[in-house]
Image: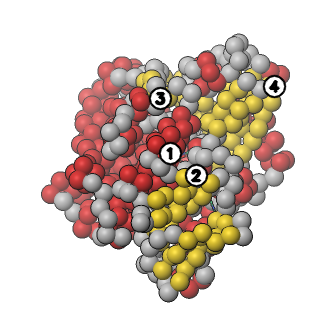
Amino acid sequence: MKSSISVIGSGFSSLASACYLAKAGYDVTVFEKNKTIGGRARQLKKEGFTFDIGPTWYWMPDVFERFFSDFDKKPSDYYTLHKLNPAYAVYFGQNDVITIEDTLEKICEVFEREEKGSTKKLRAFINSAKSNYDIAIKDLVYNPGLSVLELITPKTILKLNYFLSTIKKDVRKRFKNKRLAQILEFPVLFLGAKPSKTPSFYNFMNYADFGLGTFHPEGGMYQVILAMTELAKELGVTFKTEHPIDKILVQDAKAIGVESNGKSHYYDAVLSGADYHHTESLLDQNFRQYSEAYWEKKTFAPSSLLFYVGFNKKLQNIVHHTLFFDVDFDAHAACIYDTPKWPDHPLFYASFPSKTDASFAPKGKEAGIFLIPLAPGLEDTPQLREQYFNKIMERFEFLTSQSVRSDVLFKESFCVNDFVNDYNSYKGNAYGMANTLMQTAFLRPKLKSKKVKNLFFAGQLTVPGPGVPPSLISGKLAAELIAKELHLHLNEKDKTSV
Ligand SMILES: Cc1cc2nc3c(=O)[nH]c(=O)nc-3n(C[C@H](O)[C@H](O)[C@H](O)COP(=O)(O)OP(=O)(O)OC[C@H]3O[C@@H](n4cnc5c(N)ncnc54)[C@H](O)[C@@H]3O)c2cc1C
């Protein structure tokens, strides 16, 4: 008889694990609390408009290719990918925009215009970022984070200085122009911490940005969820939506199943892709590995206030991904990481997928997503949401020189309380636990429980960290540990591909 595994949650990490486990011969059942699959990457449809609720940036296409190739598939078997040009635009003031295009050549021209002589520096910086990318993404991040030794290789020893410096120091040393420095510091925001707290080794995100580029799957990021769900079903995975897990069943310090909607379901192992802190709350106190004090001390990635807006006209002076960096970055970052509070002058990000993909909005209209990063755990009220909507709309109108508020057909919002209610997210974090030096690799919460046998974890709070590509990798790593633990091995192809 096949060994059976229950998977908690249906985000990217759970879906990845489910696929690998099913391929390795297990009988896999996914339990998702919500009505739909996808976790933070669900989609909202309203009045002919479509919005990706969570991730909107498709970066590191190689990681997606590697995932699908492990199943002898390609992303193009499931969805169509376009490289965006421009990749994104950054506002620093009214009609004051820097546009990042789709090749390093063109980006160098922009840098040169801003800071004479910066082309040479940028090329050198991106070369170092590429070298770090090759080490990190082809090798390091596919380690399970069991020991410090995973990080010590002949290649990484030569990179020690990159772990001792920070992105901010490294960038500011090379680029005097503040706007260029801010653009180069932007990619590490995906990792959840301030550039001044992120080791400069993570400049591999700059290679992902300028070297590889920004992509858009036709129909949005949700297409990737649909693709993985289809693949999982092809591999025989069973999905149970509206099945919140209320308890992980443990006998003799061994996970034996899960309890959902008042019923017990028995399995040989349990894997959770739900937020780590929440998963541990499904266990009796004595089986939890990490105390409340442990989580309290950790640097979490921000939560967010999001708006999904249907506009009754096409908007001007914006591109698919547009960032608004016209206010003081450090002041906003302090409100997230140092003294948690709502920022007076928030930076924000906006996405207008209907600029490049007609499926997102009815003809002549625009779909807009607005995101303000916030400290996790902040008070979240309808009044605050409204106040901040007005705040950013006013700035948006000024900066892009157009009126839009009278053209809002509808808006939906999503904030701290929704992250908690919808995903059981710790303090309403949006994208997990940050990748600081002390929260990297073997220093992150472990993929395998130290206290409960046959209980495993995946997702953005464990290794390698936040973001869609790391979540895919996390799912693979957790599946491999299960295979090892239950003495069944993924096939040779999988082993050689890691
Ligand atoms: C607003 C936002 C924007 C982002 N932008 C980007 C981006 O542009 N690019 C990028 O790469 N990354 C981005 N990210 C990060 C990325 O979306 C996440 O890292 C990734 O989706 C996390 O996947 P996961 O599997 O770890 O967790 P989740 O997607 O949270 O999945 C966990 C699942 O567990 C379920 N669950 C929780 N508790 C239970 C329970 N008791 N029983 C059953 N099910 C349960 C939840 O409902 C959820 O479906 C963004 C995230 C957010 C929120």
For discs 1 and 4, the disc positioned in front in the rendered view: 1
Q: Give the residue at mark 3.
A: 79
Image: 124 above or below 82: below
Which sits earlier in the primary sequence, circle 3 or circle 1?
3
Which sits earlier in the primary sequence, circle 3 or circle 2?
3
Which sits earlier in the primary sequence, circle 2 or circle 4?
2
The image position of residue 359, as x and y in percent, is 62, 21
Residue at the image point whose x is 84% and y is 47% from the top: 383
Tell me how far mark 1 sits from mark 4, CA to CA. 38 Å
**Marks 2 & 4, CB-CB < 8 Å contact:** no
Residue type at numbered disc 3: Tyr
Image: 402 above or below 176: above
Tell me how far mark 2 sits from mark 4, CA to CA. 35 Å
Q: Is residue 274 left or right of residue 199?
A: right
For discs 4 and 3, the disc positioned in front in the rendered view: 3
Q: Secondary structure at mark 4?
A: strand
Which quarter of the figure has residue 427? bottom right
Q: Residue furthest left?
A: 154
Residue type at numbered disc 1: Lys
Between 45 and 390, which is closer to the camera in this rendering?
A: 45
Q: Give the residue at mark 1.
A: 233
